[in-house]
Image (spheres, rainbow, N blue to C red):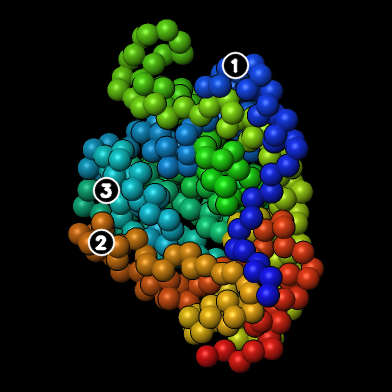
Amino acid sequence: MVEIPIASPTIGEPERDRVLDVLDSGYLAAGDVVEEFEAEFADYCEADHGVAATNGTAALHAALEAVGVSEGANVITTPFSFVATANTIQFAGGTPVFADIDPETYNLDPESVEEKIRESDDPVDAIVAVHLYGLPAEMDALRDIADDYDVALVEDACQAHGARYDGEPVGAIGDVGCFSFYPTKNMTSGEGGMITTDRQDVADAAERFINHGREVSGYDHVEVGHNFRMTNMEAAVGLAQLERLPEFNRKRRENARKLTERLSDTQVETPTEPENRRHVYHQYTVRCPDREGLKETLSDHGVGSAVYYPTPIHELGAYEEYSASAPVSERAADEALSLPVHPEVDDDDIEQITAAITETPLL
């Protein structure tokens, strides 16, 4: 039986041609191609500035440093995300404080965020809002909270390339946004990340941080920084993928629509898309009380699936010292399962996926 993978990067001649151009040029490390990618990706996000990085984790780390997270200050975020969201807070010297999530969107619950800020005995420097699975968080409410308490609002948009909130692209709604170009994302550069912002000071600080604390060029190192630079080869792939991203997202949304229609009367709970948000379905995530039974049934029918994420961050071994009350996140971690939705999924695959769920009793 044909296996339908949970992810499948779409790479073709446009990517190969751009990479060969870079190889022929001899300029393989950071250079003009990276600068072109930064400018075009910023334009795509309707942001004033783009700063490329080695990966999404580096982008998040640099962004937190750039908005001024201070040593020991609290940073509010979600426990239902990839661990890098919390790790980068610690890299920047902050302390992650976990608010709970909305049960329908899987994103930060603004009421829980404000409660955590009010309860905090230590200064709070930032909120990190994750646009999980490709659906924007509730940015109006989070922006209001950030303004009321004078804290930075950081968008972890690593799964949300092209998503929109009230018609506005994610990435420049908060003070700074961060993207990942890992191979499974909606677009890829192999590895790589991007910081987007409308703030000149944040862009300048991030650019220094990813390049050894260096001012623009030469050897004037004004602060301690890392080597988090993107290469021209990665940027070449990214430029080709950015041109194709609208079509990739259109196909993801179309696949999601078909899955939702066919699964409407089944035992699984399909994803939600609030009216003011445009979901780009990095993952098509359903909920099922018997997730392991569903996962086994799908596997028996040649359908790949994956759990993002089986353990909330505050329950991971690396975070055992961080207590949190997040029952909604914990339940989601027990019930959420992602199905194939990527652009390589065709109508026959949709039928195979839905048949596995609708024609077979779940365990």
State which quadrant residue 73 falls in. Answer: top left
Foreground: disc 3 or disc 1: 1
Can residue 348 be seen in the rendering of this structure? yes
State which quadrant residue 316 falls in. Answer: bottom left
- Three-letter amino acid code of the residue under disc 2: Gly
Per the rendering, the mark at residue 134 is: none
Nearer to the camera, 242 or 332: 242
Q: Outermost residue toward the front?
A: 1
Give residue 50's position: percent from left, percent from top. Answer: 56, 29
Give residue 236's position: percent from left, percent from top. Answer: 64, 30
Give residue 230's position: percent from left, percent from top. Answer: 51, 29
In the structure shown, which secondary structural element does the residue marked by tag 3 occupy?
A: strand
Foreground: disc 1 or disc 2: 1
Q: Is residue 104 above or below residue 131?
A: below
Residue at horizontal 63 percent and vertical 35 percent from the top: 238
Judge left or right: residue 257 versus residue 217: right
Q: Is residue 259 above or below residue 296?
A: above
- Three-letter amino acid code of the residue under disc 3: Thr
* Residue with the mark numbered 3: 95
Can residue 273 be seen in the rendering of this structure? no
Residue at horizontal 25 percent and vertical 61 percent from the top: 317
* Residue with the mark numbered 1: 26
Q: Quadrant of the N terminus?
A: bottom right
Q: Residues within 10 Å of mark 1 (few under 14, many from 20)?
A: few
Q: Which badge, 1 or 2, comes first in the chain's sequence?
A: 1
- Three-letter amino acid code of the residue under disc 1: Gly
